Image (cartoon, rainbow, N blue to C red):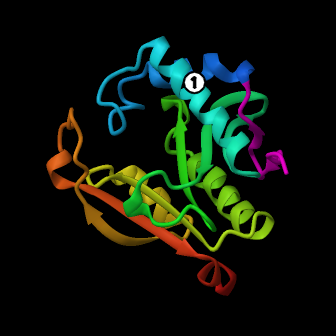
Amino acid sequence: MGQAVLHTARLRLLPLSDEHLEHEVELDSDPEVVRYLAGRPRSRREVEQLHRDRLAVADRVPGLGSWVGLADDEFVGWWALEPPTRPDQGPAVGQAELGYRLLRRHWRRGLASEGARELVRHGFEDLGLVRVFAETMAVNAASRATMTSVGLEYVRTFVLDVDEPLPDSEFGEVEYALMRDQWVAR
């Protein structure tokens, strides 16, 4: 099963491919877009490696991966459903981590939530996932609001042991999650 093309009222979500690399470079070159991810703009070389890693997810786990979002044929950002990668995130089978990143000019229009909501639906209805979760820095109020708006609930605050901590990382990371039975009951 490959990745599906998904649709919302305003978005067309297409499986990430090599033709979308320049959009990823644009996203990751904006210091505000990557503020809570890298703390600094990423180099083209870094983005190219991350792009290859994202494409590999779609090859490893059927149906999971990354999608680019288009509104009126204009690139607005990307969304992801990826298997967990750290031991503290739990088993990879039956769950996926939700992610999203939008160009700054598309912030605060509800597009992050709209795309995320569709990926949550896709994960539960089409892929049979039992759990969808998302993580961000505790201080990232906008991303936390998006997680809540699509039905994910706060699970925990934790601290990652990283070589180069970002500013405000002392406040920790947060995890939000939604179980399939909770989603069905909504």
Q: Tell me the SS state at disc 1.
A: helix
Magenta residues?
1-17
177 relative to 85, above or below: below
Q: Image point 51% across, 55% down: which residue?
A: 84
Residue 59 image-quadrant placement: top right
119 or 1: nearer the eye? Answer: 1
Q: Nearer the viewer, residue 186 or 79?
A: 79
Quadrant where the C terminus lies? bottom right
Residue that protrudes farthest toward the bottom in the picture? 185
Q: Using the image, determine if residue 173 lies above or below residue 54.
A: below
Asked if residue 14 is among those painted magenta in the image, a careful observer would answer yes
In percent of the image, x 80 and y 64: which residue is there?
126
Q: Position of residue 97 (x, y in %)?
A: 53, 56
* Image location (x, y in percent) of residue 164: 21, 32
Q: Nearer the viewer, residue 175 or 23?
A: 175
Q: Is residue 12 magenta?
A: yes
Name the residue carrying label 1. 24
